[in-house]
Every structure is written in structure tokens, then in C-alpha cells.
Image: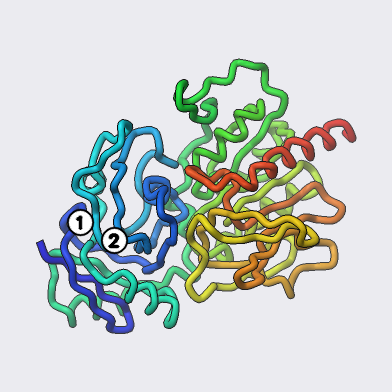
Amino acid sequence: MKAILALADGTLLSGKALGAIGETIGEVVFNTSMTGYQEILTDPSYHGEIVTMTYPQIGNYGVNSEDAESSRPHLSGFVVKEACDFPSNWRSELSLDAWLKNHNIVGIQGIDTRALVRHIRDKGAQTGIISSIDLNPQSVIAKANKAPSIVGRDLVKEVTCKAAYQWKEGGWGLETGFRTVTDKPLYKVVAYDFGIKQNILRNMVDRRCEVTVVPATSSAEEVLAMQPDGVFLSNGPGDPEPIAYAQENIRQLLGKVPLFGICLGHQLLAIALGAQTYKLKFGHRGGNQPVRHGDGSNVEITAQNHGFAVDARTLSADVAVTHLNLNDNTVEGIRHKSLPAFSVQYHPEASPGPHDAQYLFDDFIEMMKTHKMTK
């Protein structure tokens, strides 16, 4: 069945329907990863976005029940050059097309994804529509123009959990599946769910943390009443500026308990410390972003997914920049010079990888250990 992708600036591409038949609206972005498409599909940080994969064939190893980062897909739509109809992998349970249909995700394939990505790089990420029910170009472009921008919207409330819950599952092993950690926990961590990825929680459990996940709107008082050794600020979708409730809660937690943030959590921590953020032209999304750590002697290859960044010029003298993106010199990590708080813009928990930055979870453990000893 025919489908079209229309951008707000009038760009139109024709292809074939992928996944569910219907129509969907979102900000059209691109991801340069060659693998890990199931992680991308189920990452709540992509809520509100139509994701274009730059690698030409997607779905060759199918979809399974273990590689998800949340309970369901969260993106608005999916764009590929070619979706593999006959996946080949011993863990595969469904084809990509069947899985998208099951979850009512509208997609498109058969378009020139190279041309689309070049256009986004030149003109910037923008609102678009995938439709396999309305094939009138003028009608679809008009709807794209009327759709709200991702800027200034609180998307966190649309993906956060409704109530607090315990997380006890550890990381996955080839022979064992997901680990059950039976050792007595050494640290109690409360994790704010702004759109959290499950592999972050697994990394915490593997390091003998008792993890409680709480809704994004949970107050600082509620969190402190749980007597945590540390508080984690999770990844999540969209613009950090309108998430004022999270910023205020972080301000109230600063200095009282160690804080570690990833992605949106990094941006929210920076804002709570007095900095500002801005929208990137087309963002960083992929598994191959080079990041300089410290004085430059260490370079990490990182997985990233964000459309906003912290403005280094607005950081106070109390905050040190610990990581920089080597592609564009944007801020990739910060640490407060006197308070136990640090964060990174990228994803150290990335699965399938890379795993260069897993040491950050150990840094958080060490920070909690030091804070407990000081108390």
C-alpha cells in the first residue's frame, strides 16, 4: 500500500506503508545506528518523534521480547529505506513489520532516506506526517504545518509511570537471560522516571542497588522520605525548559543526596544549577558519537539521542564541564565542584552498545559510598 511522508516545509516523499495503516505526526529526525533498532523503537525519549534510520536495511535480525527498553514503543513513526521481511536470528520472534502492526506504529519504507537525511541536516529537524490513508500532498502538508512544535511542550508527563515501583532485574547474559541479583543491596537509589530506559535500571541492580522508580512529578520531600543513598535523574523526551516541577525538585535535592543524571536528566540538572538549554539544529542520534572526557587523553564512543543541549556559556563557576562532543563541541557532561552531583548527555547504558562509558555507574556508586561515610 502506498504511503507518503510530508514535512512542514513542503518536502514530500512517496513510498510504501510499513507497520500499521494510518496517519501519524511528529518531529522528523534521523538516527545513524546500524543495529539496535528495537532499543530505539522502545526508548521513551523518542516520544513525539518520527525516526528515520540512515542504515539502508532495518529488521534483518527481527524483534524479540528481551531487547526492549520499556513496555512498548513510544515514537510517533518509523522511516526506513528497506524493511527486511524475512529476519534471520535465533532470538527473533517477529518481523519488524508485524511488530509495528501489533503496536499500531505507522511507518514508511522505500523512500530515499539519504535525500531525507541531507534535507534535515541542511534545514533542521521539523514536523512531519506519515500517512497511508490521506495521499493528498496539499492536505498532508497543511496538517504538518498546523501541528504543534516539540519546543515548549511537556512530553514527560505522557511517558512517566503512574505510581512508584521496585525494579529488581539485572543485566542480560547469553546463557542466563536476565540476571536475578540475590546479594543484599548495598545502596538505595530512587530513580526519577522522565522516560526511563530499563537498561539503566539493570546497571544499577547489577551494582547491588535497591532501586525504586518514581513518577516525574514526585516531590523532593517524598523522595527524601524514602531515605535514598542516591537519586537518579533519567532520560526522557523533548524540551527540558517546560519541566519546571522537575527542575525545582532537583534544586531541593542538591546537597542533600548524591545526584546522577543522563540525557534529559543532565539537562534538568544543568537548569537547576542555573544554566540554560537550546535546541540543536538536527540533534545527536546514533551509536557512534565521539566524546572527549577530561583533559582530552580519553575519548569515548557513545550512544546518543537528544535534540537539545546545555549552553556552556550559562554554566556557573561552580560547575565544571567534564565531557565535550568532538563533532560540535557541545556539552556532554558536567559535575558540581562542591556538591555530589554529576550528569552526562549521552547514554552509558547503551545496548547493544557501545559500552565505553559504563564506568559512570561505578562513579555514582563511589559518590554514594563517599556521601554515606561523610554522613
- Disc 1 versus disc 2: distance between alpha carbons? 9 Å
Q: Which of marks 1 and 2 is nearer the N terminus?
A: 1
Q: Is residue 185 visible?
A: yes
Q: Can residue 334 be seen in this view?
A: no
Give the SS element for disc 2: strand
Residues marked 1 and 2 touching at CB (< 8 Å): yes
Amino acid bearing label 1: Leu
Q: Name the residue under label 2.
A: 80
Q: How crowded is mark 1: few (under 14 residues within 10 Å), some or many (20 or more)?
A: many
Q: Give the foreground label among 1 and 2.
A: 2
Q: Residue furthest left?
A: 1
Q: In this view, does 362 lie to the left or right of 21?
A: right
Amino acid bearing label 2: Val
Q: Residue 299 appears in which quarter of the rendering?
A: bottom right
x then y, percent, for residue 274? 74, 66
Q: In this view, does 241 lie to the left or right of 175?
A: right
x then y, percent, for residue 78? 30, 58
Q: Name the residue under label 1.
A: 18
- Tell me: residue 106, above or below residue 280: above
Q: In which quadrant of the rendered image does the C terminus lie? A: top right
x then y, percent, for residue 114? 34, 72
Image point (44%, 77%), residue name: 121
Give 135 or 289, whichever is nearer the viewer. 289
Q: Residues within 10 Å of mark 2 (few under 14, many from 20)?
A: many
